[in-house]
Amino acid sequence: MSDERLILVTGASGYVGGRLVTSLLANRAKVRVFVRDANKAQSHTWANEVEIAVGNATDYQSTVKALTGVHTAFYLLHSINLGPNFDQIESEMARNFAKAAEQCGVKQIVYLGGINNDSKTSKHLQSRANTGKELATTSVAVMELRAGIIIGSGSASFEMLRHLTHRLPVMTTPKWVSNKTHPIAIRDILWFLRNAAKLEKPVTGIFDIGGPEILSYAEMMQKFAKISGLRRRWIIEIPVLTPKLSSLWIGFVTPVPTSLARPLVGSLISEVVADPAKSISHLIPNPPEGLIDVEAAIHLALTKVSDNNVLTRWSDAAVPTAPWQKAQSDPAWAGETLYKDTRVRITDASIGSLWEAVEEIGGETGWYGSDFLWYMRGLIDRMIGGVGLRRGRRDPLHLRVGDSLDFWRVESLQNQTSLKLYAEMILPGKAWLEFRIRKLANGKSEVIQEASFLPRGLGGRLYWYVILPLHTFVFPTMIRNLIRSANRKDYAALNA
């Protein structure tokens, strides 16, 4: 690949995009990323090795700026989480991106879509196909790679498969579990994408990419159970279970929220199988070691999870919020009421141990007490369509800006100094939870724990006062147990 060839990766903070950047850099490519949040991009290990362009694909000027000087642009954006009109949003974004690419003289657009060869197709898959059509409306060459279920640590499809199989030894399922699918490992997805950027000449066309096996979703669950050392699952098909009902159930049982499960489940009503006539092998041959089969892909994904080495996760993409929740960190002069619950403690615990305790919060660690109340709040959020607590976290020990953390997201992080979380639960306003630690002149440490809430209207104010009594249980317990955890770490270090 020529060193002069500049490659743009959109969706670089997402599941596939984040891994593609790493893969391209390993091949010594010159990479620019197009992101909405520079701080989120800066938290990745590759931040200092790429150019960072900030903007939004819906904004023409920022898109043009990002595409200027680019040879190959990877289009990895989707909007399935943005409500019922996501298909219109996706089409508009793609049309805007294509026009900007043409203006900037981009030679090649590479788009990752979904296999769509069945006569029955979901709104999600149809939107993916329409996105490809919109991208191809200009003179810029568009290579559309269509894939089915992606198996890899952190993918939404894998998380669905993993949690359904682990938690339900007996399943009543809709008939779509018998539909044929053509899964592909994330490693092979990256192989085809990476090599698409190396082609000597621009290519226009639609190409299906799939793994070496075609099997049903039920067969994948049985393979997962076998690899995980679980008994064979009992799967009972019930025709009356619609995709909508299925997604509600998946949203309740797995970390994947109903809003994301719905389009994923909807896609399974189709036979998602690659068409041999759309093979890409004449342009990009399979990897030298061959494509990874389903069992190997599942094994690799589980290894990454057990080793706490999940590079990117489906939840890396921000969850859409109500209009009044979208603008974060309002300026103090805005004049709105900001309610706060601030707790300050002085402790002998070291800064290092305090920071470890702060950074480990959530997920399997929990929220340092009042677990039942946290569970109930998460359950209520799930019941009204929110993400709930089941998302957990990408890494049990370390956080980075943009990470999802149960129903929070890391808004800012300064090592051994502060952690600020933004609430992605459904609320009548906006909420943050912040921890700040510092060393005092007398050698002791100060811990500040602050919950703040910016209400929307009367409903938001009422909400704050309704839950205020619960704060008297939750927040004092949280800071007390956080400090206890830090003290235990110090004690363990001294006696190691």
Image (cartoon, grey):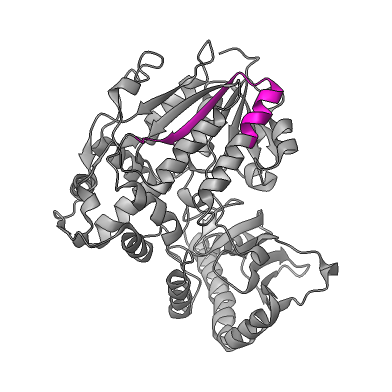
**Can you name the residue that lies furthest to the front here?**
119
Quarter containing the N terminus = top right
In the image, 72 versus 116, the foreground residue is 116
Q: Nearer the viewer, residue 342 or 94?
A: 94
Q: Does the magenta stretch include residue 271?
A: no
Residue 177 place in picture, x, y as percent: 23, 50
Q: Where is residue 424 in the image (x, y as percent from the top left)?
A: 56, 64
39 left or right, relative to 113: right
Q: Residue at x 46, y 56 (%)?
A: 396
Residue drawn where x is 37% and y is 41% of the image? 152
Segment colored magenta = 96-116
Measuring from the top left, give residue 119's x and y in whole percent: 30, 39
Task: Please give left or right for residue 326 compared with residue 304 in the image.
Answer: right
Where is residue 319 drawn, in percent x and y?
55, 57
Please indicate, yes or no, whether residue 45 appears anywhere in the rendered image.
no
Q: Nearer the viewer, residue 277 or 45?
A: 277
Give the vertical position of 323 relative to 93 (above or below): below
Q: In this view, does 328 lie above or below 301?
A: below
Residue 171 visible to an observer of this rendering? yes
